[in-house]
Image: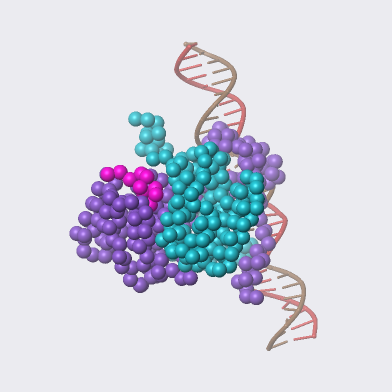
Chain colours: A cyan, B purple, C red, D brown
Amino acid sequence: MSTKDLMNDLKPIAVNTRADLVEIQLREYLDKKGLKAGDVLPTEMDLSEALGVSRNVLREGLSRLRMLGLIESKKKRGMVLTSPDILGSFERVLNPQLMDTSTLKNLFELRLVLESGLADLLFLRKTDADIKELEAIIKKDKSGDNDVFRVNSEIAFHGKLYEITGNETLKRFQIMLMPVFDYVLKNENRSIKSNVSHADLVKILKEGTKEDFVLAMREHLRPHYENLSK
Amino acid sequence: MSTKDLMNDLKPIAVNTRADLVEIQLREYLDKKGLKAGDVLPTEMDLSEALGVSRNVLREGLSRLRMLGLIESKKKRGMVLTSPDILGSFERVLNPQLMDTSTLKNLFELRLVLESGLADLLFLRKTDADIKELEAIIKKDKSGDNDVFRVNSEIAFHGKLYEITGNETLKRFQIMLMPVFDYVLKNENRSIKSNVSHADLVKILKEGTKEDFVLAMREHLRPHYENLSK
DNA sequence: ATAGTACTTATGTACTACAAATAAAATTAA
DNA sequence: TTAATTTTATTTGTAGTACATAAGTACTAT
């Protein structure tokens, strides 16, 4: 049995620090009490006493929840639960430099899946102004001549597509995934010449059917799909 | 201008705590130095001195990075950079109870987009064993008679689809999104009867083409799409 | 050379003290 | 009496010290 298999079967015995436990217990507490955004938490003193840890350690735990946007604190007023920014935490971790290659590969695929599945939202929410903007991006693309220009145009085009979905989470997700995309593409030196151009896609989005668009988008992305390993 | 618009234009002046700044600066430090997984960090004493904060505050910042899985520390050995578990942090925040409704809606749509875009990965990686397993899930479904059974089968079927993609990130993402999906569906009381059944999907996955599957999956999800607002 | 021991170093935890902000209470002015 | 002002009390934010705990490192004895 390989070391990798072994590591998969035998997780290292978790030697949780007090701060880890604080985080876990606080989370359980929120859940059990059914607390929701706006509710106030006990004071640090009360919490640290109840948990049997120093205020230091308690604050290390609280600091984590604060970072995630789960709580906010004001002097004298105390701490209140808040609606977390779900992508904020994601963002903090998305450093291609630090990620292992398999995760990078997975995220690259994830983005392909997303773009392949955008069609219905696009047709549901597109406006004439959106189409015009896409056409403008393409026009600009044709006028540019160097690679940097072309890459920026590529980003602008696909970014605009996400924007049309009207789904802010999706849009931000795409922005966050951009460096990952870049990182993977840089290590891909095969050609990525597609049969379906941006102009083709816009034409279909403007005059065609959802079904046409779905198939065209997949065709547009095909060079990337063909580079995937089985 | 409404208060909401105003709040969108004017973000509250960030009154960063020292711990916030520590987190930011450490992140910049890692980036600037181009440090990668396995590299060691300076000691807490050196860091706190360099940043001009107490060791307490420094540790509040470090605690965040530790939670994200960006660093690990051992006594005497010091701190080392690690490959973060990118979904771990996401998971910590995905509490439907705390999320605002627009984010919930966005995540629901995100999942629809994902499932609509799975086709290519499925056809790239499916095996005979996978098909058999899907068929088994369907068979079980037919034998069950109550709602709970049907819901579990629904989960099992779609979960298996993600599994077939061989993309661990995607799969975990789906698992994490499940409670969100549930939460949204619970507040939807319109019928969700589809023209394309699980059995139909499996048949196409087994004998049909990618293109057929793409269209069939969208048709399968259509009831959900139709409930979306413009 | 090896086993064992003492030493050193870095993280983990606790405690105390005070600064800063601010809600609430008390006081003063109209 | 009411409004404005000042004072007080409370809670988070920060600093500093001390010690516990784990784990490399060096040294010693066999």
The answer to whether B214 appears left or right of C25 in the picture is left
Return the residue nearer the eye: B27 or B106: B106
Residue A160 location (% of width, % of height):
56, 59
Return the residue nearer the eye: B163 or B103: B163
Q: Say whether residue B89 is visible.
A: yes
State the count of labels: 0
Quick check: B138 above or below A229? below
Quick check: B148 above or below B156? below
Residue B62 among magenta residues? no
Quick check: B166 above or below B39? below
Return the residue nearer the eye: B84 or C3: B84
Residue A167 location (% of width, % of height):
51, 63
User: Residue furthest toward the left?
Assistant: B143
Q: Quadrant of the N terminus of chain A?
A: top left
Q: Residue at x 38, y 52 (%)?
A: B119
Q: Say whether residue B99 is visible.
A: no
Residue B25 location (% of width, % of height):
66, 46
Q: Residue at x 69, y 44 (%)?
A: B51
Q: Residue at x 33, y 45 (%)?
A: B126
Q: Residue at x 31, y 68 (%)?
A: B193
Residue B126 among magenta residues? yes
Return the residue nearer the eye: B112 or A94: B112
Q: Quadrant of the C terminus of chain A?
A: top left
User: Which SS type dominates the magenta stretch?
Assistant: helix
Residue B13 location (% of width, % of height):
68, 62
Magenta range is B119-128
